[in-house]
Image: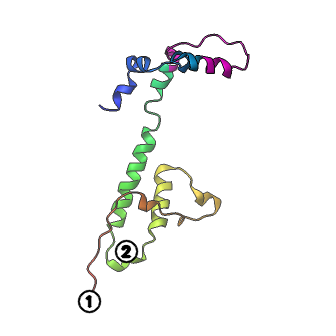
């Protein structure tokens, strides 16, 4: 609920105000910014057309967010499938992370510029506890 109130037409309209209406100094600054060009007085509140356009963008990146979460979960499961401690030590986590990211999200990274799949440390950007297998002593 906390972030959803800002997607209400009524709240967007009541929160919006062109800065030139806030004070006489801001009005003078706005008129000065026009550099002598003739311009009609701006609307005091955000125009309805702009509110409509804002509301249409509410879910723009939802699919990418969900793909990112899918990538994190799939990577997390993959690193927990190691059959032994030795298998985990041999695993190239960066290569696995980046190849899964590209396969799942379909977004290119530096690998298309020849960096290979082992660039960066994206796997360190979220908490993923790699199991510590008991070592032979």
Look at the picture and state if 77 lies above or below 8.
below
Label 1 packing within 10 angstroms: few (<14), some (14-19), many (20+): few
- Nearer the observer, 50 or 40: 40
Task: Give the percent coordinates (x, y) of residue 46.
Answer: 50, 17
Q: Residue furthest right?
A: 36
Residue, x 67% and y 22% (percent of image)? Answer: 33
Look at the picture and state if 91 lies above or below 26.
below
User: How many numbered circles are shown?
Assistant: 2
Look at the picture and state if 6 lies above or below 107.
above
Give the colouring mode of the picture.
Answer: rainbow
Per the picture, the main secondary structure of the magenta-coloured stretch is loop
Report helix, strand or loop for mark 2: helix
Residue 137 image label: 1
Report helix, strand or loop for mark 1: loop
In the displayed structure image, the side of residue 134 where residue 107 appears, left or right = right
Residue, x 60% and y 64% (percent of image)? Answer: 115
Label 2 packing within 10 angstroms: few (<14), some (14-19), many (20+): some
Judged by depth in the image, the label closer to the viewer, 1 or 2, is 1
Residue, x 57% and y 19% (percent of image)? Answer: 25
Q: Which residues are magenta?
A: 28-50
Task: Give the percent coordinates (x, y) of residue 24.
Answer: 56, 15
Location of the N terminus (image quadrant): top left
The residue to which callout 2 is attached is 88
Task: Give the percent coordinates (x, y) of residue 87.
Answer: 37, 77
- Nearer the observer, 34 or 125: 34
Q: Is residue 135 magenta?
A: no
Q: Is residue 37 magenta?
A: yes
In the displayed structure image, the side of residue 88 where residue 105 appears, left or right = right
């Amino acid at each position: 609920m906390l972030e959803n109130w800002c997607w209400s037409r009524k709240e967007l309209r009541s929160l919006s105000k062109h800065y030139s209406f806030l004070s006489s100094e801001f009005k003078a600054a706005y008129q000065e910014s026009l550099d002598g060009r003739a311009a009609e007085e701006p609307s005091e509140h955000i125009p309805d057309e702009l509110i409509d356009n804002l509301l249409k963008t509410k879910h723009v990146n939802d699919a990418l967010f969900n793909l990112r979460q899918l990538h994190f979960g799939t990577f997390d499961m993959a690193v927990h499938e190691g059959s032994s401690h030795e298998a985990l030590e041999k695993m190239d986590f960066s290569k696995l992370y980046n190849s899964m990211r590209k396969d799942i999200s379909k977004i290119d990274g530096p690998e298309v510029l020849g960096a290979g799949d082992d660039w960066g440390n994206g796997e360190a950007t979220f908490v993923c506890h790699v199991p510590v297998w008991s070592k032979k002593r």
